[in-house]
């Protein structure tokens, strides 16, 4: 019904208009918004509008014990929660000068890579959906569920695992688990040709993604782009190799790159990373039985755990890019300050604003998915 | 290519006033520097040493010393090392210069620090609110802002008095110790 | 805090209109059955619980076999799924969305965060109890609930629609003053939405003693005619320069 105070809004006749793109929009990833200014259907300016998923994590973490925060951190990036746990645990370990048992490190790598595969499959699904290919979305989500099943058996949680704690991991893998991991990897690898046919070499997708949202290496470096998006511009940089953490320096893997830097290249890089991750998981599966020992070091009573004063910046490579935690302790039982540098805080704000300009409106969603932007990471 | 910061850079840096360099390990260098000299340092690091990637800017509120600490994390793709530059600025009025002309990612971090801590960055392209557009209170990340008190004042808690619990309590059972009591016992 | 207290409003028994058609009850039954069998849920991910919806919708758990499908516009949707915590900024949009949906409409609160704030109980940015701002028909607790739980919740809602118990939307009209009071408490006194809820309430014959009150009076005082939204592209940024080149 029309409210009594209804008045039609008159606009001057113009080809230019502004549009709210999101937060309640099927093309937007998560709960996020863009204000776009259009000329016809070409975007001439875009401004990101975030904060819909803001929970004030950095404040919350200052009010909780070191160990309690483990339950908080995975919520920061929902599709790919494991790097959050690992990175935070690594930061606390660095503050404590704590050694992590080798077996725990391998288990963490296994978890990180499984999570990366799951996140990439999810992103492919979302990206395909924005180009109208819903079958890929159905497949991607269903195949991701295979990995979530592994996680569930391993840690008890499908999405949030709360499995990594400072000093190691909570418990060892169940009996026969590695066989099931290998089996799932075989399955996912056998699916890759299907994905190629359906999505990656699909002419509809290639035509739409080619030359959409291009950036060159120079721009990418200027804008602080990291992760697969940077590698899609031809720079082979990966925190796992260039600033190694855990046992990544003992693992053999390639860093796939592509030169063009458009949406198509970014997706192809992820497609090849999927293969590399499967390769890494296989190595871990092979290696794990020969690494014995405990899976965590003794930590003091976690309810009265005063972490020595200091500061540290740890970073890991998440599926979206470089993830960093800056943690300051003043010697108390709670963090003094935690700052989370999510990779998407660059991709979803400045980079997206720049890349959307010149694109057509229907490609904006595609650009956002090809950047693999994760809004909760921006808002925190 | 050496994996550490090259010695000539060390010498160069020594010439900047009020600088203190600490090497944490082969890939991590911590630099404490006077607030005035930071733009010079960043220019040197970016222009001469290849530290082109600004990973993060963090603000830490040292309320007891009445100072804000700003930490700039810089990564070099060439020497593969991370420099963290620390400066202190006065908490009041909390104004500093933007490094946007050197590092574009700074725009996001400075905007974020502005709304969370109220530090103003002169020359930053956009200081409007991004996340907290509907927030009228003080900058929430400052230490003096007590989020829990604000929540208690603004929201009501749900009361948990399910019938089954009442029944048990009538028979003398139920929750013997409230969570608050249980927590207090701990050292 | 005083306006946050729940006031007891006698809910008038809906006036039984004398129904002349002998088949009226049969029709009612039929309509409710049809409603419960084709539900369109609005596609709006407010929080992290939304990540379990794609599995629930796609081939593995396949909600569609229950007749539930995502819908992209609020005006065609029946169910508003609140998937997790709502930050205050989102809550405003959620209320706007809810008021745009056509009746009958149902709200499901997924996740513990919608019940009582969940693990963000001390966060300054999230609203704690969803049912103070919107009538919630069903909660699905869990952090986060599994897809099976979501399906189970949907089945419950179907049953409640069939039996006519899911009438939260009527409650919104009957006690609009109370809901509005809570909204004003959080968003400030000048909070207004484009929908004319009181008018709708009388349209549906649901206006009662709780529909209007001090808060709706406050709303009427503060109400301004709708104006074009301010342009977003005034503040100087690196973007603006590019905007002009397309002329
Ligand atoms: S209940 Fe858990 S999963 Fe759901 S919104 Fe809250 S934190 Fe996220």
Image (cartoon, coloured by chain):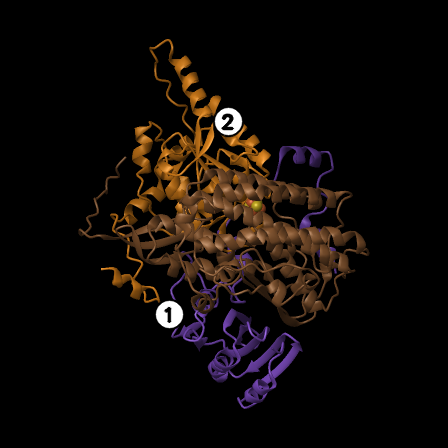
Chain colours: A brown, B purple, C orange
Residue at the far right: name it.
A293
Return the x and y of residue B179 as percentages of the image width and height.
Answer: 68, 49
Label pair 2/1, CB-CB below 8 angstroms: no
In this rendering, is residue C192 above or below B107?
A: above
Residue C215 location, quadrant: top left
Q: Is residue A154 visible?
A: yes
Return the x and y of residue C55 as percentages of the image width and height.
Answer: 55, 38
Return the x and y of residue A120 as percentages of the image width and height.
Answer: 55, 50
* Residue under label 1: B125
What residue is at 59 percent from the left and 62 percent from the top? A62
Residue A36 location, quadrant: bottom left
Q: Which quadrant is the C terminus of chain B positioned in?
A: bottom right
> Disc 2: which chain?
C
What residue is at 52 percent from the left and 31 percent from the top? C63
SS type, badge 1: loop
Q: Is residue A85 left or right of residue A135?
A: right
Q: Is residue A355 left or right of residue A343?
A: left
Q: Which quadrant is the N terminus of chain B positioned in?
A: bottom right
In this rendering, is residue A161 above or below C73?
A: below
* Residue under label 2: C66
In this rendering, is residue A247 above or below C20?
A: below
Q: Is residue B119 left or right of residue A150?
A: left
Looking at the image, which is closer to me, A25 or C171? A25
> Disc 1: which chain?
B
Return the x and y of residue C70 as percentages of the image width and height.
Answer: 44, 35
């Amino acid at each position: 019904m029309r409210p009594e105070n209804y008045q039609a809004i008159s606009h001057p006749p113009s080809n230019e208009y502004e549009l709210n793109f999101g937060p309640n929009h099927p093309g937007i990833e998560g709960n996020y918004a863009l204000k776009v200014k259009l000329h016809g259907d070409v975007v001439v300016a875009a401004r990101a509008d975030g904060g819909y998923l803001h929970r004030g994590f950095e404040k919350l973490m200052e009010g909780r014990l070191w160990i309690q925060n483990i339950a908080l951190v995975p919520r920061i990036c929902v599709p790919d929660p494991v790097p959050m746990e690992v990175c935070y645990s690594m930061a606390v370990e660095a503050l404590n000068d704590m050694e992590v048992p080798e077996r725990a490190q391998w288990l963490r790598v296994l978890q990180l890579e499984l999570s990366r595969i799951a996140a990439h499959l999810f992103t492919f699904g979302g990206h395909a959906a924005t180009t109208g290919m819903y079958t890929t979305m159905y497949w991607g989500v269903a195949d991701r569920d295979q990995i979530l099943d592994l996680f569930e058996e391993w840690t008890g949680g499908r999405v949030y695992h709360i499995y990594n704690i400072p000093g190691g991991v909570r418990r060892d893998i169940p009996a026969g688990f590695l066989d099931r991991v290998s089996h799932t990897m075989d399955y996912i690898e056998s699916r890759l040709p299907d994905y190629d046919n359906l999505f990656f070499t699909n002419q509809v997708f290639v035509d739409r993604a080619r030359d959409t949202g291009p950036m060159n290496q120079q721009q990418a470096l200027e804008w602080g782009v990291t992760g697969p998006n940077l590698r899609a511009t031809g720079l082979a940089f990966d925190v796992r190799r260039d600033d190694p953490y855990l046992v990544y320096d003992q693992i053999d893997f390639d860093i796939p790159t592509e030169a063009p830097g458009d949406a198509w290249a970014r997706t192809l890089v992820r497609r090849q990373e999927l293969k590399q991750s499967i390769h890494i998981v296989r190595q871990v599966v092979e290696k794990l039985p020969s690494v014995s020992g405990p899976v965590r070091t003794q930590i003091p009573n976690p309810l009265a755990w005063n972490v020595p004063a200091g500061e540290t910046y740890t970073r890991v490579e998440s599926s979206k890019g470089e993830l960093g935690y800056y943690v300051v302790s003043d010697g108390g039982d709670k963090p003094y300050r935690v700052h989370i540098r999510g990779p998407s805080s660059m991709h979803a704000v400045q980079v997206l604003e720049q890349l959307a300009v010149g694109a057509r409106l229907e490609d904006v969603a595609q650009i956002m998915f090809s950047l693999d932007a994760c809004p909760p990471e921006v808002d925190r | 290519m050496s994996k550490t910061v090259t010695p000539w850079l060390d010498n160069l840096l020594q010439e900047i006033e009020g600088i203190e360099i600490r090497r944490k390990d082969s890939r991590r260098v911590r630099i404490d520097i006077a607030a005035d000299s930071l733009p010079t340092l960043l220019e040197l690091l970016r222009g001469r040493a290849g530290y082109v990637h600004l990973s993060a800017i963090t603000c830490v509120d040292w309320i007891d010393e009445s100072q804000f600490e700003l930490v700039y994390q810089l990564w070099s793709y060439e020497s593969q090392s991370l420099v963290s530059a620390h400066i202190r600025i006065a908490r009041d009025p909390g104004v500093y210069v933007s490094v946007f002309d050197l590092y574009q990612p700074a725009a996001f971090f400075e905007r974020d620090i502005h709304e969370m801590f109220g530090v103003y960055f002169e020359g930053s392209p956009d200081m409007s609110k991004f996340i907290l557009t509907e927030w009228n209170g003080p900058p929430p990340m400052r230490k003096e802002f007590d989020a829990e008190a604000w929540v208690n004042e603004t929201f009501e808690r749900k009361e948990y008095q399910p019938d089954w619990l009442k029944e048990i309590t009538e028979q003398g059972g139920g929750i013997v110790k409230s969570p608050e009591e249980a927590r207090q016992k701990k050292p | 805090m005083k306006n946050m207290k729940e006031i007891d409003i006698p809910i008038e028994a809906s006036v039984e209109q004398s129904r002349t058609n002998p088949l009226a009850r049969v029709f009612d039954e039929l309509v409710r059955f049809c409603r419960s069998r084709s539900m369109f849920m609005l596609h709006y991910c407010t929080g992290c619980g939304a990540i379990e919806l794609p599995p629930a919708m796609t081939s593995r758990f396949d909600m569609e076999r229950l007749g539930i499908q995502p819908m992209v516009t609020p005006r065609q949707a029946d169910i508003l799924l609140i998937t997790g915590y709502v930050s205050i900024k989102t809550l405003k949009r959620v209320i706007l969305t809810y008021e745009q949906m056509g009746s009958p409409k149902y709200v499901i609160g997924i996740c513990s965060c919608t019940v009582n704030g969940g693990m963000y109980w001390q966060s300054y940015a999230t609203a704690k109890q969803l049912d103070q701002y919107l009538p919630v028909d069903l909660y699905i607790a869990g952090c986060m609930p599994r897809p099976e739980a979501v399906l189970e919740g949907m089945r419950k809602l179907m049953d409640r629609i069939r039996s006519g118990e899911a009438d939260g939307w009527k409650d919104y009209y009957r006690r609009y003053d109370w809901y509005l009071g809570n909204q004003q408490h959080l968003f400030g006194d000048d909070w207004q939405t484009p929908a004319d809820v009181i008018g709708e309430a009388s349209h549906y014959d649901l206006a009662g003693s709780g529909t209007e009150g001090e808060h709706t009076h406050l709303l009427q005082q503060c109400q301004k005619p709708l104006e074009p939204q301010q342009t977003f592209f005034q503040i100087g940024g690196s973007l603006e320069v590019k905007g002009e080149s397309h002329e």
